[in-house]
Image: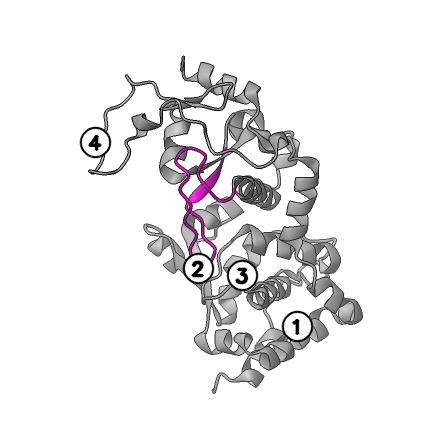
């Protein structure tokens, strides 16, 4: 059978969904709407669909409006089981090839993210979704079949960038601290973590606070991380003044106490912690001792002195 537009319209209208509880479980159509939205936004530019914060927050947006009260809003379910519809495929992470090939059930979002690198569509379908007219037909097929009562409101909902809205709300609050109960939902935790890290990096102008390195790929991937000063696993503190923008090397070094930052925001290098050899004409890490870090534009976003002091005491940095 030719895999043309009519083929996929039929596929989208005949998704294999769970009907066991007397109600349709809409996970698969909601996931497809989420993927299509991110593709239109330019968040997905290649036939590689990652379990990103953008995808998860978009899925949660649709679930809030279109989901079922009987079922859980678990993106891991359709991301894994949509393979049964024949046009959705999984690319395993190294070491998990046999797990995916054997169709081992992955029962949590964490397990799925560990095992799967990304999902990808049939090439024919991906190309159709990149065409605005074909994409419109496929969206209509999903909405009319699965969410017909929401057809009028759908276009308004479709225009809402859920991850951006979450970041704006978080930014207005200056970040947030969480209870253990707040972190019980894996999906929401992924979104919160990504939002914190993206905002912190933006506050530092996308530059490493230590070495000022700034490298951003054409698809917006960043070599700089949003790092916690006091570990999130211990303090659950996502306030932005508990954050630093650090490149991969200096994030790793900071988390192991290879340097600290004093109350004047200057770098302290304990010279007895490591040895190093730097290529000619490049600065060694120890050369940064005493330098002022790259700081955010607004003083309200400077690293919290209490957090910096905690880090120095934690690692015995004088």
Looking at the rendered image, the disc whose residue lies closer to the viewer, 1 or 4, is 4
CA gap, disc 1 and disc 4: 58 Å
Looking at the rendered image, the disc whose residue lies closer to the viewer, 3 or 1, is 3
CA gap, disc 2 and disc 1: 32 Å
Mark 4: few/some/many CA within 10 Å (<14, 14-19, 20+): few
Query: To which residue does mark 1 refer?
Result: 142
Mark 1: few/some/many CA within 10 Å (<14, 14-19, 20+): many
The residue sitting at the bottom extreme is 2
Relative height, residue 274 to residue 36 (above, below):
above
Where does residue 132 sit, x and y in percent of width and height? 59, 78
Q: Earlier in the sequence, mark 3 or mark 1?
A: 3
Q: Residue at x 68, y 76 (%)?
A: 140
CB atoms of marks 3 and 4 within 8 Å: no
Query: To which residue does mark 3 refer?
Result: 43
Residue 108 visible here: no
Query: To which residue does mark 2 refer?
Result: 218
Where does residue 195 sit, x and y in percent of width and height? 58, 44
Identify the main secondary structure in magenta: loop
Which secondary structure lies at badge 3? loop
Q: Residue at x 70, y 70 (%)?
A: 146
Q: Earlier in the sequence, mark 2 or mark 1?
A: 1
CA gap, disc 3 and disc 4: 40 Å
């Amino acid at each position: 059978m030719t895999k043309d537009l009519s083929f996929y319209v039929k596929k989208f209208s005949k998704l294999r969904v769970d009907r066991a509880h007397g109600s349709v479980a809409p996970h698969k159509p909601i996931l497809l709407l989420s993927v299509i939205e991110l593709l239109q936004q330019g968040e997905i530019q290649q036939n590689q669909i990652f379990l990103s914060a953008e995808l998860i927050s978009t899925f949660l947006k649709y679930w809030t409006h279109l989901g079922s009260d009987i079922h859980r809003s678990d993106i891991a379910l359709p991301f894994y089981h949509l393979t049964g519809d024949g046009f959705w495929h999984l690319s395993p992470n190294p070491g998990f090839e046999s797990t995916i090939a054997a169709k081992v059930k992955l029962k949590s979002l964490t397990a799925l993210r560990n095992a799967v690198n990304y999902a990808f569509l049939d090439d024919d379908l991906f190309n159709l979704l990149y065409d605005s007219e074909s994409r419109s037909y496929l969206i209509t097929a999903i909405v009319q079949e699965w969410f017909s009562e929401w057809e009028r409101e759908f276009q308004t909902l479709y225009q809402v960038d859920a991850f951006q809205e979450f970041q704006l709300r978080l930014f207005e609050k200056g970040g947030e601290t969480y209870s253990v109960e707040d972190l019980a939902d894996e999906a929401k935790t992924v979104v919160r973590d990504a939002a914190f890290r993206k905002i912190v990096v933006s506050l530092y102008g996308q530059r490493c606070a230590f070495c000022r390195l700034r490298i951003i790929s054409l698809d917006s991937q960043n070599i700089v991380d949003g790092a916690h000063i006091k570990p999130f696993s211990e303090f659950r503190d996502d306030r932005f003044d508990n954050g630093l923008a650090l490149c991969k090397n200096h994030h790793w070094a900071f988390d192991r106490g290879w340097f600290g930052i004093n109350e004047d925001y200057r770098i302290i290098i304990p010279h007895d912690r490591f040895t190093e050899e730097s290529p000619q004409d490049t600065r060694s890490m120890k050369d940064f001792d005493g330098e002022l870090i790259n700081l955010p534009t607004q003083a309200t976003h400077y690293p919290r002195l209490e957090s910096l002091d905690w880090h120095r005491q934690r690692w015995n940095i004088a």
